[in-house]
């Protein structure tokens, strides 16, 4: 008598897990921002309504390389951002950052 073949004919063939080769480009990973320390911030009151509340930034951010000190803290870049006040007035805000 033939012994029972215990091997399951429908034995699952394990497919090798396809692994995506993750190539890490040298240098900074994508999306990482340049770390900078904000040493100073110039709060500009809205000329229209007098509010100093900061709205959402929009448009482009302008970065100017300039070394100096703000309240004794050294900075090397001035970042100019445009923000819209709650009243609709556009305000230019400056922050002093150290990169
Ligand atoms: Zn305003």
Image: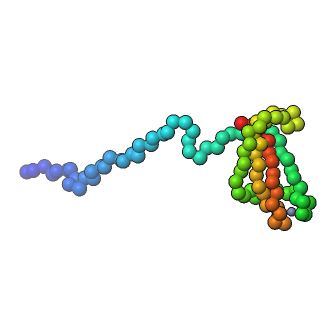
Residue in view at x 49 percent, y 39 percent:
25
- Looking at the image, is 39 positioned above or below residue 58? above
- Looking at the image, is 57 positioned above or below residue 68? below
- Whether residue 37 is visible here, answered yes or no, is no
x and y, in percent, of residue 51 in the image: 89, 59
x and y, in percent, of residue 62 in the image: 72, 48
Q: Quadrant of residue 33?
A: top right
Q: Quadrant of residue 95?
A: top right
Residue in view at x 76 percent, y 52 percent:
81
Q: Nearer the viewer, residue 99 or 13?
A: 99
Residue in view at x 30 percent, y 49 percent:
14
x and y, in percent, of residue 85 in the image: 82, 61
Left or right of 56, for residue 29:
left
Dividing the image into four quarters, tell me where ligand 1 lies.
bottom right
Residue in view at x 27 percent, y 53 percent:
12
**Could you tell me how many numbered marks the image carries?**
0
Q: In the rendered image, which quarter contains the C terminus?
A: top right
- Whether residue 3 is visible here, answered yes or no, is yes
x and y, in percent, of residue 65 in the image: 73, 39
The extreme right residue here reads 50
């Amino acid at each position: 008598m033939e012994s029972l073949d215990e091997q399951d004919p429908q034995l699952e063939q394990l497919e090798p897990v396809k692994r995506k080769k993750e190539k890490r480009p040298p240098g900074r990973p994508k999306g990482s921002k340049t770390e900078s320390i904000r040493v100073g911030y110039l709060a500009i009151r809205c000329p229209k309504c007098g509010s100093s509340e900061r709205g959402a930034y929009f448009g482009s951010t302008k970065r100017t390389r300039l070394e100096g000190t703000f309240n004794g803290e050294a900075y090397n870049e001035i970042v100019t951002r445009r923000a819209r006040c709650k009243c609709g007035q556009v305000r230019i805000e400056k922050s002093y950052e150290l990169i």
